[in-house]
Amino acid sequence: MSLQSKLALLGGAATKAWSQSASGGIAEEQGVGQLEVNVIFTDPTATAAALQYAASLVQDLAGCIRLRAPIVVPLRLPLDESPVSVRFMEQRLSDLVRRLDRDAIEATVHLYLCRDRLETLLQVLSPDSLVVIGGRKRWWATAESRMAKILRSKGHRVVFVSVGKGINAISN
């Protein structure tokens, strides 16, 4: 099950993007007025918790979930030579979405090969997007909590789903 790819130049930053619906087809454009919840891939456990939380948000609202996974490619490599197998990531992300067990929820996977993870997210997210990020809540700043803080500062509505000893959603 191969994904259709396209090379896009976003604000001067090259990004290679793949998009696939949970059913295996190529993703379609979002309908006007439809609730869209963007889940950012952090790690499998945290992302699974974030997907479950997002599914509870869109369950009765006929919304959709966009699982967005920016994969950073080091500068020494060409943009289309990811340090992580694209096919492996496609499979991993599709498996996470399939675990939702909710047929009524539209979910698509978007994989981006990029140089800067945060810059790519800022370019692909619509203004004032609803974003769900999973991660561990620590007393020090983690990569996930820093990402949530920056996305909030850019005007996005961010929910941080804390995983660990029970799952808690923290929204600011």
Image (cartoon, rainbow, N blue to C red):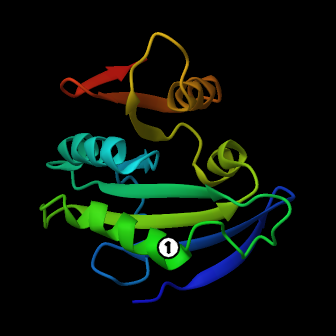
Q: Residue at x 31, y 45 (%)?
A: 45
Q: Residue at x 12, y 62 (%)?
A: 101
Question: Which of 127 and 172 lies nearest the eye of the viewer?
Answer: 172
Q: Secondary structure at mark 1?
A: strand
Where the N terminus falls, by quadrant? bottom left
Tell me: 126 left or right of 29: right
Q: Is residue 43 above or below residue 66?
A: above
Q: Position of residue 129 (x, y in %)?
A: 50, 41
Q: Amino acid at mark 1?
A: Ser
Tell me: 166 left or right of 113: left
Question: Which of 78 and 153 lies nearest the eye of the viewer?
Answer: 78
Question: Which of 43 and 114 lies nearest the eye of the viewer?
Answer: 43
Q: Is residue 172 above or below residue 62?
A: above
Question: Which of 142 and 150 lies nearest the eye of the viewer?
Answer: 142
Q: Position of residue 155 (x, y in %)?
A: 59, 29
- Give the number of callouts: 1
